[in-house]
Amino acid sequence: MDIFEEDYQSLDETTGGLKKRSTLACLRCRRRHIKCPGGEPCVRCTQANEPCEYMEGDRKIVISVKYLNKLQADIAQLKIENANLRTSLKNVSRDEVIEEEAPRASVDPTLNNLDHLSTPSIDDPKMMPKPKAVSVEGEVITPYLDKYGRIIHSRTGERIYVGASSMTLFGLEVNNLITPIPTSPESVHSSETPGPIPRSTETILEKEGNAYRIMLGKTYSRPGISVNFTLPSYSYAMLLVDTFVSYNDGCFYFFNEGLVKENLRRIYNDEPTLKPENYDDIKEDQTLLETMWFCKVLLIFAIGEMYLGTANSPDGYKLKNKGNKRMKARKPVPKLPGSGFFNQASELFTGLFASGAIDNCARESGIEVLLLYAFYLQVADCTVASYFYFGIALRASLVLGMHVDIGKETFNRYQLEHRRRLWWTVYMYERMLASKAGLPLSFTDDNISADLPDDFDMSNPEKNCEFYIFPEAEFIRNCVKITQINADILGRLYNRQPKSNILPVVHELVMNLLKWKKSLPEYVNCDYTQPEIQISRLVVNMMTEYFQGINLAVRPLLFHFVVLQLKSSNTKLGEYINLSKCSSVILTLINASFQASINTVRSLWALMPENMVALFGYMDREYLFTSTATLILFNAAFGVNEITREHLDHALVIFTKMRNLGNHPAALRREQLLKLLELLNFNGVWNDLLEAHLDSFNTPLPMFNESTQQNGASFLKSPSLGPVNSEAFQAIEKTWNNPTDSDVKLWNDITTEAIWLNDDFGEEFESLLESCKP
């Protein structure tokens, strides 16, 4: 039972006794996170003159595996049909635009004037003929040095990418010039890419029920190992995959949902699995890819269970803490949800990617496994190891040429889309982790020429492609774009001491963020001006990254004001910085960060009734911590306590629930926030909040049942940064083009001090706090 369904007792006026309320709460009470007295309608809804609706609680029923398979197949078919409809709608709208423009073009008076007609200019690079190299005998010589490199076979048989500057590719091109031109594609392939060298090894897969044993034979690069693992029940396996998909699918792409579910169905039904793509017909490659697939599925189960928030048995039932000591000693309960599956996957992972077999990473399946492995390590607070494995996944993607769409003419549309979405997911996580950890980026966007994911016609799939499922591309495209903007912020503001005034840089970065927000379609946007926001998990994934970018861009300005406040005597007098004399540029920037922090908390809080907050997730935890800490600094500098009190309370309630479930990194973040609140508790303004949350080992009820500032209204008289406020957008742009002298001086001071980059800022902050104490 969660915090929204606690027992509630009310006095029965007719009998004078106590009547226990049903655990089912109405939707309105659930949204407000208050106790519901029950009844149809309940007393609270009656008093508020609002409709009272109930949602039927979850019930466990017994269904056949055959019926479950049918439902899964129907869902997969519906997803494919939805993708086809989206593509058809785009094509229809494009045709309508062309038809509307055609009549206008036909009656254009300028077409009747021959003076307006001109022949293509020879200076136009698009109209210039492409030169062809011709030998003395008139033979056409193959153009040397492909624009983006080429795929070749390595000495051990892997398909790898070599760039245009590679000496290997240069040697192949020279060889083409001095040898006869091949007449068939087969001979071209054999002359350019030597065939794989067979490797003598043995991999054996044994199965008994849901128990498996994989024996990886000893090779020159790794010792032989034997790994035992167990798959969960089919229904629980599908639940874990669906849970993973519901939190990530659309915004990120770790694997193809349709292929994984179809292979799971075949595994549980003892049917032959789908043939892996791009593998050589030798037993070792086939069994190696099967081992990678099992490792990948176990990692999916681990992450899915992490999102569920509880460690369950293989049948999907919660593990009991009670029991005899002998059983406890034999099978200890995992502390982190999913750790049981992760430990099994780690044994396979070690055998697959041992130091001598690291080249196994240079496969699409290997990249998927690396991504999932690094993702779970991130959740387990192993940041350094996670960063290493994300880096290996990135380099493996570069080796396969995913960043330049190499070999796209050899892949069908499904395989190409799969590679693109996988590449951009690797790209995003490398960028996001670098941002969270404060580490430099591994490579620049100038090296990327791969197209963004896109929707396409899936109505007539090719052979072995009928099980592919691709969610709508709009989400992942916008996630890539906002990640690119945030990476730009990281590279231009947080890597080195600025050499010139950063006002133009901050202006450009914030405008890029606003343009991204303004360009979002309505169905992937959220109107934060509403008192109660309705938001999906996928939109939260995007918007929290957008709010993170706003906070990163404005942080230098906020730190400057916080230090000014702590250095002054205003703190002891209970006074705060007065922004009335600041320009509209400063007000807009401060207001943007303030609203971004509030709306981050609001977004995650809106997901709590649906149990869609990743209580063990890394991103939710870090986004919530950053926004909450930013709000505390706003309170210290500007005295906006009454506006932020509700949101700080909600953030601490979420952190307390994370802590109580066993999320140790969240417990640490919670303690840091409470310590910061305690240090900045000037004049006792936070006594009630600290009293409610300090040393609370039970998830507290929210202090604010009825929202006091539900729409996150600004505490400043400045333009709102709403989703479709074009007037404010234009006003900001005009104001920024003509900064005042005071703004230039302020930003010169901020640039010179560079407080947000100082290594000893923490010590300076502590000394300032000591000086503020009465």
Image: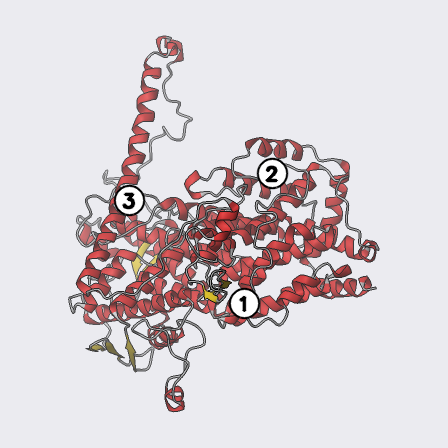
Q: Residue at x 80, y 54 (%)?
A: 574
Foreground tag (1 vs 3): 1
Q: Residues within 10 Å of mark 1 (few under 14, many from 20)?
A: some
Q: Quadrant of the N terminus?
A: bottom left
Could you tell me if the residues under marks 2 and 3 are in contact, i.e. CB atoms within 8 Å? no
Q: Which residue is mark 2?
A: 720
Please report whichever mark, 1 or 2, sits nearer to the chain's N-terminal start.
1
Foreground tag (1 vs 2): 1
Q: Secondary structure at mark 1?
A: loop
Q: Amino acid at mark 1?
A: Thr
Please report whichever mark, 2 or 3, sits nearer to the chain's N-terminal start.
3
Direction from residue 165 to residue 600 in the image, left or right: right
Camera-side residue: 639 or 700?
700
Q: Position of residue 390 (x, y in %)?
A: 44, 63
Q: Secondary structure at mark 2?
A: loop
Q: CA distance from mark 2 to mark 3?
A: 36 Å
Q: Amino acid at mark 2?
A: Ser
Q: Which residue is mark 1?
A: 699
Camera-side residue: 519 or 395?
519
Direction from residue 317 to residue 49 in the image, left or right: right
* Count of marks overlaid on the render: 3
Q: Which residue is mark 3?
A: 83
Q: Position of residue 366 (x, y in %)?
A: 34, 65
Please report whichever mark, 1 or 3, sits nearer to the chain's N-terminal start.
3
